[in-house]
Image (cartoon, helix red, strand yellow):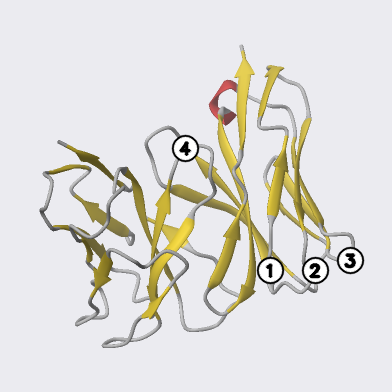
Amino acid sequence: KQEVTQIPAALSVPEGENLVLNCSFTDSAIYNLQWFRQDPGKGLTSLLLIQSSQREQTSGRLNASLDKSSGRSTLYIAASQPGDSATYLCAVRTGANNLFFGTGTRLTVIP
Amino acid sequence: DGGITQSPKYLFRKEGQNVTLSCEQNLNHDAMYWYRQDPGQGLRLIYYSQIVNDFQKGDIAEGYSVSREKKESFPLTVTSAQKNPTAFYLCASTQGQHSNQPQHFGDGTRLSIL
């Protein structure tokens, strides 16, 4: 069964720093990988979706990469801001209706 | 604005009681999903539906039931058979039945036991 791991579980950085969040998965037979943001007590907001045939996707200060063969994805956040503080989750899709989630990385950006 | 609306935001269940969580979407999405989120665990799939009048069990369907009578609505009932219902419940939807589309989520319902 697919397992998704996110390390570290929590991360604190000073404002303005560039940072990388990591996601690894055990089965490389995926359709796509999606990064989400979750604020406390809220639902998930989709940030980026990378198809299995793609290597990276960019949106503003966010860049997500995918190395399917090694089972890894990274989310790069440039010039972090206090408003970026949230939990970031990655999820891999292995079938039409199966999305496997990691447990997330809780990011705190210190002003 | 299009989106997914979950209600209520907070819900309390008495022992032996069934409760129903509402999920409505105006995105015209075909597929809808229910997940459960517990502290320290990833989201787990309870039920999903690809089209009206059809739904399938996910990984943790025991103690739950759903219906899909309308495209825009996918209510989840937490029955008295679910012995540990305290969790954050999230509803999601995807356009079409294809696996290359992103999932969109509602703001969740937090269920607690009285």
Q: Which mark is nearer the camera, 4 or 2?
A: 4
Question: What crowding class fits label 2: few (fewer than 14 Cα within 10 Å), some (14-19), or many (20 or more)?
Answer: some
* Mark 3, residue position: A69
Between the C-alphas of marks 1 and 4, the distance is 25 Å
Question: Residues under labels 1 and 2: Cα distance?
Answer: 10 Å
Amino acid identity at mark 4: Pro
Give the spatial CA distance, label 4 vs label 2: 27 Å
Element assignment for label 4: loop
Of the residues shown, which amino acid type is indicated by label 2? Ser
Residue bearing mark 4: B39
Identify the element where label 3 is drawn: loop
Tag shown at residue B102: none
Q: Judge if badges 1 and 3 mark residues of a common chain.
A: yes
Q: Circle 2 — which element?
A: loop
Which label lies toward us, 1 or 2?
A: 2
Q: Is residue B25 visible?
A: no
Are discs 1 and 4 located on one and the same chain? no
